[in-house]
Amino acid sequence: MTEPARARPRIRRGTETRKRYRRITFRVLEDEYLQVEAAASEAGLTLASYTRRRAVPEPATASRRRPSVEVIALVRLQAELNRIGSNIHQLLRHVSFGRLVDSDELHAAFTGYREAIEAIKAMAGPLP
């Protein structure tokens, strides 16, 4: 006779592995919320990490940093450059296979590329 199949141990994932599972909720006035949000932003922390740090002097887990505005803008620019690069690559593949490419499409792709490069230069500022 064959043995019955054993169930493999279940691997814990996502929310099942969280150390923080208890919630504390409270209500605040709009101006109080804005004050706390501004303080959290100034500290470079998420709202939850900031309030936890203020309420618990030595939290057991690390605070979660809020990405800076520059990092968020660079990530968006990188995504835009990836999209433009993909479009240019597809157009050049068509050309290499001898297909005709609409000059307006090619012009639009390179214009988008130039605009993204200019945005990066503007963010970086003048070179030293």
Image (spheres, helix red, strand yellow):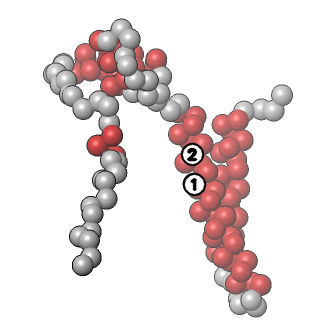
Residue 108 in sight from this viewpoint: no
The residue at 29%/30% (across/down) is 20
Nearer to the camera, 74 or 57? 57
In the image, taking residue 35 as reference, residue 81 lies left or right, namely: right
Contact check, label 2 and label 1, Cβ < 8 Å: yes
Residue named by callout 1: 79
Check the image and report above or below for 39 versus 67: above
Identify the element where label 2 is drawn. Answer: helix
The residue at 28%/43% (across/down) is 16
In the image, taking residue 64 as reference, residue 97 lies left or right, namely: right
Residue 12 place in picture, x, y as percent: 33, 47
Check the image and report above or below for 106 versus 116: below
The residue at 53%/31% (across/down) is 68
Residue named by callout 2: 75
Q: CA distance from mark 2 to mark 1?
A: 6 Å
Q: Which mark is residue 110?
A: none
Q: Quadrant of residue 80?
A: bottom right
Quadrant into which the N terminus falls: bottom left
Nearer to the camera, 90 or 117? 90
The residue at 68%/39% (across/down) is 122
